[in-house]
Amino acid sequence: MKSKSIKSSKLSLKFANTSKSLAIGDFIENYHQLVSNYVDVLWSLEKIPVLIPKEITSSVSTTLSARIQQCAGKQASGIVRGTRKKQEQMMWRLKKLEDEGKFKYARKLQQKLNKTRISKPIVKNLECELDERFVRIDFENTTSFDGWITISSIGSRQKIVVPVKKTKHFNALLDNSERLLKGIRLSKEKITFNFELKQKESKIVGSTLGIDIGSSSVISC
């Protein structure tokens, strides 16, 4: 059986000039605020949708594009659903400890659960997850840089083009991967690229049974 795996590598944004760095910083702050607002709304809902409906996105004021609003909404939904799932797992574990009579461990877990239950996820250091609708990756250029990353469709007809230089780790993944995925994760200092590694045959675990087909019986083991 063949299996796929994803690995990532980060390239620095230190080669961007001041105006480009400020533009990225401004976009990320607006994106963080948008995700935070969506988290506030979703946190009060009993059932969290994967894709946020228009009545929620339209209730939050932002200068970012409708596409980015969808993108931020999906990321906010994943954050809230992930937090809820973690809490549900803790509650299941708590009940199991109580059923097994392990009350000391149950009390410690209950204290931890009481703290996390009332705290919403924090998005301060969140990396913006941008798919191919917003990103164009160009490593086929003749400039002094190894590549140029264009970020667009983010609002107010804004386009940010930043240069990057490859690292040894990036080149190693590029040479040994099936392909470079088109989406990125963006922070103020770095761009994270994802690689789909080449498929490998999974080893079959278990013993081998030999069967000898003889003339005196149908099957002899």
Image (spheres, rainbow, N blue to C red):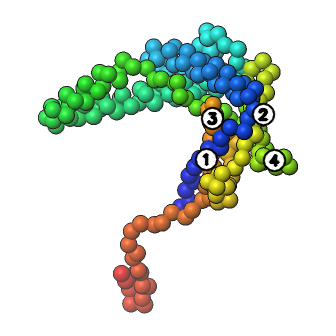
Cα separation, mark 1 vs mark 2, equals 19 Å
Say which element carries label 1. strand
Callout 4: SS: loop
Q: Earlier in the sequence, mark 2 or mark 3?
A: 2
Q: Nearer the viewer, mark 2 or mark 3?
A: 3
Quadrant in which residue 108 is drawn? top left
CB contact under 8 Å: marks 1 and 2 = no
Amino acid bearing label 2: Val
Where residue 144 is drawn, which disc sits there? 4
Residue 150 or residue 181, whichever sits in front: 150
Q: Nearer the viewer, mark 1 or mark 3?
A: 3
Q: In whole angstroms, how far apart are the C-alphas of marks 1 and 4?
A: 21 Å
The reply to whether discs 1 and 4 touch (Cβ–Cβ < 8 Å) is no
The amino acid pointed to by label 4 is: Ser
Residue at 45% across / 14% down in the picture? 44
Kind of residue indicated by mark 1: Ser
> Residue at horizontal 13%, vertical 35%?
101
* Place of residue 106 in the rendered image (x, y in percent of width and height, measured from the top left): 20, 31
Secondary structure of residue under mark 2: strand
Q: Would residue 152 be found to the left or right of residue 79 on screen?
A: right
- Distance from disc 4 to disc 3, alpha carbons, whole Å, reads 20 Å
Q: Which residue corresponds to mark 3?
A: 189
Q: Position of residue 191 (x, y in %)?
A: 65, 38
Q: Callout 3, which amino acid?
A: Glu
Q: To which residue does mark 2 refer? A: 161
Q: How far apart in space, not on screen, are marks 2 and 3 (Cα)?
A: 14 Å
Which of disc 3 and disc 1 is earlier in sequence?
1
Q: Disc 1 or disc 4, which is closer to the eye?
A: 4
* Element marked by disc 3: loop
Q: Is residue 68 visible?
A: no
